[in-house]
Image (cartoon, rainbow, N blue to C red):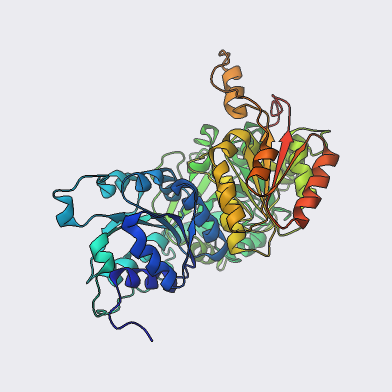
Amino acid sequence: MPDPFPRAADLLARRLHEAGCRHAFGMPGGEVLTLVDALEAAGIRFVLAKHENAAGFMAEGVHHRDGAPAILVATLGPGAMNGVNVIANALQDRVPLIVLTGCVDEDEALTYTHQVLDHRAVLAPIIKASFRLTAAGADTVADKAVALATQPRPGPVHVDVPIGVAEMRMAPGPRRRRAPASPVAPHGADLARARRWLAEAERPLAILGLDMLGSGPVPRAVLEQFGVPVVTTYKAKGVLPEDHPLALGAAGLSPLADSHLLPLVRRADLVLAIGYDPIEMRPGWREAWDPARQRVIDIAPVPNDHYMHQAGLNFVADPVATLEALAEGVSARPTWPGGEPAAARAALAAAFPDDDAWGPAAVIAEARDALPPGTLASADSGAHRILLSQMWRCEAPRALVQSSGLCTMGCAVPLAIGMKLASPERPVVAFSGDAGFLMVAGELATAAELNLPVIFVVFVDASLALIEMKQRQRQLANHGVDFARHDFAAIGRAFGGHGVRVGNRAELRAALAAAQAAGSFTVIAAEIAPGGYDGRI
């Protein structure tokens, strides 16, 4: 029987459970103990991580599997500050992250200063909104947090929870729920002009961005109907299955891939930028097309103010509803009579071969071939991520998860832990550079405690490979990019998992087979030579 006088923390937790949340991650302090207790009582499992930044990425990993808002719990002061990086990442990567921090009561803060700082002031530039929980308004605050975090564009919302308020009991007040907004589509003269452009296009091309995650079957159906080839950003990989004949793969950070894709973009007579925010893209995508010469339609849920590109038509509307409206009554015609997209697709395949005897491309190719369909993957930032994002094929969205807007290191391991926790039936592999892995190696303890058989592949070249490459390209002396080779396999074993070092394809193939049959996590340290990415990304 429900408690007739629940705590304010209970009302907050129940609303999060109602939103579909089943996991929360963090590191508790005395200020959030009531909150953690309320989450557990509401049916939301609290998972103890080893660092708040990793906890936030674990929460994001769960979100990508269950679609519910992610939850990060941090205590006041240093706990909240440890989460700043992942909160900023959530804003840039459209993650609906509910950030719950403990704080002292207002009267207490007048004379007590130990660990006390203004969380809201620090987080203001990297969150959509911040609330301070009150007992009478707990349910309303919770609904506002969920609504703001999940509405376009999704992002982090912060709730400061005072100790005394969390424990306060009172009869529940009116239950307030904001109804989801209905999708809005364009109309009128601009829509008529867009339809005419689509009908007249001989060489249309679409760029799909991360706002299309969760967009369902409509984009594919419309693009197939009109024969529109598709480039995606890295985060949007799989929105159109990458084995589809219209799929040209992903772009964003690879100059090698851009050498084949950007000429095709400039050849197009109609560019459809659908849910596309160039926050994921390297500077080479600045002004990737010429709106004075090409017809460009930008479709985004909020106005784009980045000035990375311009368009002849800007629709601030729901992208799916807009595509449906755009296609209505328009007759399809044959496109790209010269076959340029197929030629670019073939050139890209040749540019990223998978037959190297050994090296980072061979590691990716072996993993891709050895792991079964439906495998979920995460990628850390670094040179390996660029290569992986070009070579790893996604049949569905969110099958390869990474930090794209912020490109932050140390995300692959905790993302994989979160994905495996939410989808225990799916194989999960994390790809990390050795430096990024060292940042979060302590979370192997979390994987062991949760008994999660994740496969952690580490590219070991004892260097910040991408930065070292840029250093050489600028003809600068070698400083601050190389470090010692460490025994990552031994680190895996020390934390209670399996660990193996591999130096060729046969050893890696055997290690991947054993890892799939293992009952606990496996660290596979793939030893590669320095400079293995030269000319490959």
Pick the residue in front: 221 or 188: 221
132 to the left or right of 151: left
Q: Number of callouts in the render?
A: 0
State whether residue 360 is above or below residue 229: above
Pick the residue in front: 342 or 208: 208
154 to the left or right of 330: left
Residue 181 in view (yes/no): no
Q: Quadrant of residue 156?
A: bottom left
Q: Quadrant of residue 115?
A: top left
Quarter the C terminus occupies? top right
Quarter the N terminus occupies? bottom left
Pick the residue in front: 229 or 249: 249
Percent position of residue 33, x then y: 36, 61
State whether residue 278 is above or below residue 139: above
Most distant residue in the right direction: 506
Percent position of residue 187, x then y: 42, 65
Pick the residue in front: 7 or 461: 7
Percent position of residue 313, x then y: 45, 51
State whether residue 270 is above or below residue 382: below
| Residue depicted at 65% across the width and 43% down the height | 494
Percent position of residue 334, x then y: 70, 55
Q: Quadrant of residue 26?
A: bottom left
Residue 29 in view (yes/no): yes
